[in-house]
Amino acid sequence: MDTNSHDGIVGSDEDIKRRQQVFGRNNVSLPSITPFLDLYAQQFEDSNIVLLIIAAAVYLAFSLFAEQEASYIETLTIYVGVVFATSIAAAADYV
């Protein structure tokens, strides 16, 4: 390695260039980070989330024909719960 046991590496420009040619550059590649929206979209592949969305859609269809005026609010709370749960899970995966 052409080092001096007392002084170590010389460190001049010529020595650095020679060492880079012999040993290569000392680079550390950064890991790739998955974007948040990709992680968020992956949360909808969960079978429980899909089941909740289908159940909410069916419940919404029944609530449109119901005699009560505010029966759609329960469907809205299911959708809000799904969005909340998927957001928290995606945020946990992102961090």
Image: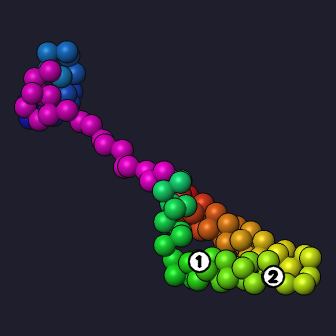
Q: Residue at x 7, y 31 (%)?
A: 22
Residue 30 position in % (x across, y down): 36, 44
Circle number at residue 65? 2
Q: Nearer the viewer, residue 19 or 25?
A: 25
Say how the picture is coloured.
rainbow
Q: Amino acid at mark 1?
A: Ile
Mark 1, residue position: 49
Tell me the magenta residue range. 17-35
> In the rendered image, which quarter contains the C terminus?
bottom right
Asked if the magenta segment contains residue 27, the reply would be yes
Q: Quadrant of residue 26?
A: top left
Q: Amino acid at mark 2?
A: Phe
Q: Residue at x 81, y 82 (%)?
A: 65
Residue 4 position in % (x across, y down): 14, 30
Q: Is residue 43 visible?
A: yes
Q: Residue at x 86, y 79 (%)?
A: 71
Residue 84 position in % (x across, y down): 70, 67
